[in-house]
Image: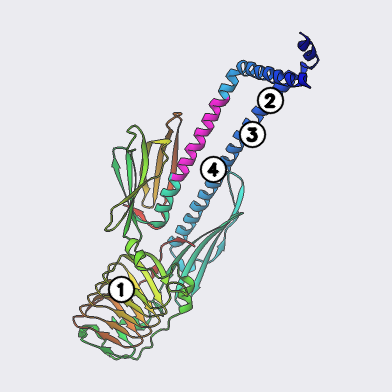
Amino acid sequence: MQRLCYLRPHQRGFAVLSVIFLVVFLFILTQGILHIVCQQAKSQQEYIRQRQIVVLGIDLMLQALQTKEPVKLSSKRLPTILLYPGAESVVPQIQVENCATLPLRAVNVEIKSKNVAWQMQHLQLEPPGGTNHEIYNNIIYSGQEIIGNIPKDLLPANYPLTNIVPTIDTKGYLKYKSMPLPDACALREVGLLSRIYANDNGVSSGLYIIGNNTIIKGNGVLYSGNPINLQKDCHSSGKLWLICNDKIIIGDNVKLEHAFLFAKGPIYIGRNVSICGIIVSAGRIELGDGFSMQGDKSVLEKFSTSCYMN
Amino acid sequence: MTRRNGFLLLEILLATMFICVLFTTFYQLFLQKIGSLGRIYADIELHRAARVIISSVESELVYSTREIVLEENKYGSMIICQNIGLRRSVVFYCRNMPNERNKTAIYKSTKIEDRTAGINPLSSPEVSIEQWQCEKINAHTLRLKMQIKITTLGRCKTFVEVIRLCNGCVI
């Protein structure tokens, strides 16, 4: 009784304290929920905006590539677009680069937003000197001599010719490459992804070897400043360009179904090799026994890479 | 001092009792709050699951695919993608989970030539895919429709996405 009497003056604090506890608890709970919801809403908004940027970029790229007169296509900065939710402004831009020395035409679509720049690239590459260069009137051409048994129907009428082999723009290939030269693992697991591959000063520098029995699938342009060695029993079924600033060595029993070989140095071809396409060398060409070749000028058509994120 | 300690204990007990009374009084309100918390959690989970699935499907289809073939199985569409590199093919499909017969999930099967396919689920075990339908709009565009359900709460949402192929076409 004495205790209760003692407590009586403080009883007003009980209700206040309880209510404060309850309010604090509910407040923390509500804040927690709001925080989670806000975070998720932000990531959802970001995701929606990113998808809009991707769709916009892809549409622009496809429209640029489907233009009936692609020669007239030029660099353009399009009006600013507001993306919702968030009212984020983005500036789409189409950039067209022409590199006459390769020759190459690059279509770049870039969309700059507040934080990131989304970039996509598509390249159209011609053989050195251009598709219409007079040297490509020949199925097989050597700047010096062709050694070995060559089917007579492959030789041009006025052989040896005095045409000048076009130069290779080495810096151009290195500038526009999308990937380093693929190693055996990449060729085995993925294949060529319709892109320009070139060696660099890193892992893929030095002699480029495609090992025995490699089956190369897909299309690709492989450029190497150093020798390329395609070892025996390799097989390629896609559109394959081997461009080398040095020599190219083709091993025995290699079969290339749709190939364009261009070397600044000599080209050595092993025994029982079958090639369908065009061979050009500024040096000599040595052919092994059982060599068979079929001319295919369609390999000289512009090489269109896949559209890829840059 | 001794009296003050006793007072504190008694005060806490009374405060706790008071809170319990308040909770009981506002029981419906709390129940609603917990219910809405569950729904918010479910919505967050549904959107997260949809984002993961769509991002994975889209990145494969848009950039890396050369040819797409659409087939049907018991649970919906099978999206068969031939990679640009031709050595790799990917199939997105829906089927029931191995240990839970009443739940379905989206799987991504990646096949590299001369190897067995590697299969990975794209959706989490907390959700079940009620509908997985993909249809061709034109040679370069697909419409993907999926219905995802949170199994514990029964909340369901439908997501529709249009996917434009950049390097490939639909057969």
The residues bearing labels 4 and 1 have C-alpha atoms spaced at a distance of: 47 Å
For mark 2, what is the residue?
Answer: A21
Q: Which residues are magenta?
A: B33-52
For mark 1, what is the residue?
Answer: A259
On the same chain: label 3 and label 1?
A: yes
The image shows residue A142 at horizontal and vertical percentages of: 32, 87
Compare marks 4 and 2 and give the one earlier in the sequence. 2
One can see residue A300 in this view:
no
Residue A300 as seen in the image, left or right of residue A292: right
- Local SS, label 4: helix
The residues bearing labels 2 and 1 have C-alpha atoms spaced at a distance of: 79 Å
A155 or B128, nearer to the observer = B128
Say above or below: A103 vs A29.
below
Say above or below: A56 vs A121.
above
Disc number placed over residue B24 in the picture, else none? none
Pointer 1: residues within 10 angstroms few (<14), some, or many (20+)?
many
The image shows residue A27 at horizontal and vertical percentages of: 66, 30
Which circle, 4 or 1, is nearer the viewer?
4
For mark 3, what is the residue?
Answer: A31
